[in-house]
Amino acid sequence: MTDGAQQPIYLADYTPFGWLIDQVELTFRLSPDATRVTSRIRFRPNPDAPGQEFFLHGEQLRLIRAAIDGAEVTPALSDTGLTCAVPDGPFTWEAEVEIAPNANTALEGLYMSNGMYCTQCEAEGFRKITYYPDRPDVMAPFTVRVESDLPVLLSNGNPAGAEAGWAEWHDPWPKPAYLFALVAGDLVAKSGDFTTASGKNVKLNIWVRPGDEDKCDYALDALIRSMRWDEEVYAREYDLDVFNIVAVDDFNMGAMENKGLNIFNSKYVLASPETATDDDFARIEAIIAHEYFHNWTGNRITCRDWFQLCLKEGLTVFRDQQFSGDMRSHAVKRIEDVLMLRARQFREDNGPLAHPVRPESYVEINNFYTATVYEKGAEVIGMLKRLVGDEGYARALDLYFDRHDGDAATIEDWLKVFEDATGRDLGQFKRWYSQPGSPRLSYTDHFNSGRYEIHFKQENQDTKSHPNKQPQVIPIAIGLLGPNGDEVLPTTVLEMTEARQSFAFDGLAARPVPSILRGFSAPVILDHDTTAQERAFLLAHDTDPFNRWEAGRALAKDVLIRMVADGAAPDATLLHGIGRVLTDDDLDPAYRALVLRLPSEDDIAQALFDQGRTPDPLTIHRASGALKDAIASHLRHDLGAAYEAMTCPGPYSPEAVDAGRRALRLAALGLLTRLDGGALATTHFTDADNMTDQQGALTALLAVGAGEDQAAAFYDQWRHDRLVLDKWFMLRAALAGPDNAAEVLTTLTRHADFDWKNPNRFRSVIGAYSGNAAGFHLADGSGYALVADWLIRMDGVNPQTAARMSTAFDTWRRYDADRQGQMREALERIQAHSGLSRDMSEMVARMLGD
Ligand code: B3K
Ligand code: ZN
């Protein structure tokens, strides 16, 4: 591991590269320990950036030879690349390098997984393959020749010839190096066809290891639906003859949108009813769509530099959210997205890792593939759409594709198309891209003689890195309900632009109940002391499904906080309110299941901290258990009825309707198991004929400290299926109770199947454990010490995966002095480790800094 350069890179320092590239030709002679890569690249001076020294990125490469226009040259080499004297005009650069994919444990560049060669180049992995200007604004068409005895040899673009021992690929679309991909292996394809709107036939292949081909149907179907949707909704057609997806077991993240050759973590491709849960199916659908949608938002139009990452990620997340909503239920999807946003992005935005949606500096760009860039980036687009309306949005997107196809673009370009298409000035709106932190929105209201006034206040807390924050544009979707629950003002979008701003509604017969921030119209923290009665009223009557759910959620949060802080008893208003929703057969079961789900223990810790209190994770854990017990006893009868009613006739289908019924049934089972000690869940486990039910029953049992026999049976049944075994590890680590959580973790990490260098397995154990609030925050600090040990160990082989999981410690300032000390000590111990990666050093420094 190298210490790497720790110097930050700044957005303000952007300069274009001094050359343009007309053509790239690469040849790979594959060998595990000594792969030879030869490159032939036609450069010509960039008239917009004359006079630069010729520098090519390159890391961990052994240069065999280099030549310019056929004449050998001897470049000056450093740890990060090479410089070389070059001619004034156009020239052809040639180089041959040697790399060792087998030794590449970081899984960035060209590496191996179970005998298969595969690449991951975003953000800066191409420089580990050959010398190149590895930056997104340098775009070129690529021709690639792969030589190997392996049967399947793939790269980007269209096939351009193949015989035994080699294959050639040509990608006509200019692309940055981060979209380069190569795969070679003993693979089989599940294939399909797609005819584009203009009548072009596209061959679709999902490549997997032999034996997995029967688990690709859903992914293939999701791909076809994504392709059709992008044509219908965004008028975007696919632009190559083939679209290949490859599933790989060792992968640092979910998937990668390489042009024409998406590479996926096998977890997000392979699914059968027996091995994948309903949630897995939904995630596969969303990720297949996300990567496919990148073909236009990311690949055809890419980012000028990595600071613009949200340009492709925020937009593509927004698009995949729209798609999933169209495929399933918009209301349920919105709630799930907001749950995730609050759990991950709000936590990030309100702690030491806060950064703007468009960051201004970084040391290691891989540390900025964050919830803020992705999920808040998507929220910003949702706000834009709300502000300019559906038609304005459609016009702006058409203009974006028209104007910027083939470009490496910026957020300024993006906002300009909205300004030009709609005539709006987005100067103030742009602050969403530059000011970190979740704004706090509060209000007071008055009713007098038929006039309802509401006075909003927004606070954008200053931080050291971002002092003097200015008011943001906040679209507040509001509705008003009359005293009988009838809607007296349908959803209306108020545009807040000032720090304080008032709005009035006239002609009302009685004081209304406001429903504010409908559909979660802006990523803000709504701060208002709403009474339990008012929340219960909204939970019963709000016509906006998001806010109806939100009312129940907020009520549960208030109740839990009072239970934790004052030892209060569970509140009857909440129990009745949940009961009404549970038994309302007009409501979608998936939606009802979400209403039964309580705020997470981490949410409560954050809420207490926000109120100036010191959260104790164990007290929160107990209170959360007590509230679940109270809901279970109070609603015993209705839960039993829901459990009986929510069976799914017919064979398993992953479609939303059946998945929703199973979700409600399992939510009921989880609560009922708290009452019966596990009798029903034991039967459910035995009868289960699909993974959703099997995992759901095991979860219910483990959550109450039972289920040892079922856990053992689950392990025996699935020990040879790596993805299902990940679930077993995950459940054990996530559900270990605080009494023995550290011991459980230690046992899991000593398990013969704890193949820790596999990122999925590592995340299933260490990631799940650090998300188990009561198990991680043990009073003696042993949870922190164990996780820190594993992060240090993982950092030595795979910095990206280790650094990403270090965020377990980002909440350290929330807790009592002892825990703060222990968490800080764990971070300092990581920091002091010699040879720490650049990725991890930056993360730890940010967490320890302010
Ligand atoms: N663009 C990739 C993420 C790359 C992460 C690099 N550390 C997947 C995606 O967002 O679609
Ligand atoms: Zn993406």
Image (cartoon, rainbow, N blue to C red):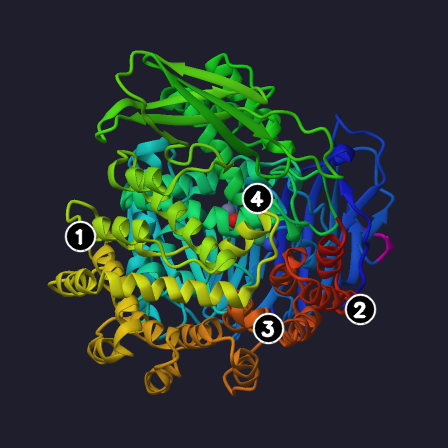
The residue singled out by tag 4 in the image is 372
Crowding at mark 2 (Cα within 10 Å: few <14, some 14-19, many 20+): some
Which residue is painted at 55% across and 79% down in the image? 745
- Distance Cα–Cα, label 4 vs label 2: 29 Å
Amino acid bearing label 4: Thr
Q: Is residue 557 above or below residue 455?
A: below
- Whether the residue carrying mark 2 lies under 8 Å from ligand 1 is answered with no
**Which callout, 3 or 4, points at the residue further toward the start of the chain?**
4
Amino acid bearing label 3: Leu
- Whether the residue carrying mark 1 lies under 8 Å from ligand 2 is answered with no
Q: Say if mark 4 contacts mark 1, CB within 8 Å.
A: no
| Residue bounds of the magenta highlight | 70-78
Which residue is painted at 32% across and 13% down in the image? 450
- Distance Cα–Cα, label 2 vs label 1: 58 Å
Amino acid bearing label 1: Thr
- Residue toward you, 52 or 371: 371
The residue singled out by tag 2 in the image is 835
Position of 283 compared to 299: left or right? Answer: left
Crowding at mark 3 (Cα within 10 Å: few <14, some 14-19, many 20+): many
Amino acid bearing label 2: Gly
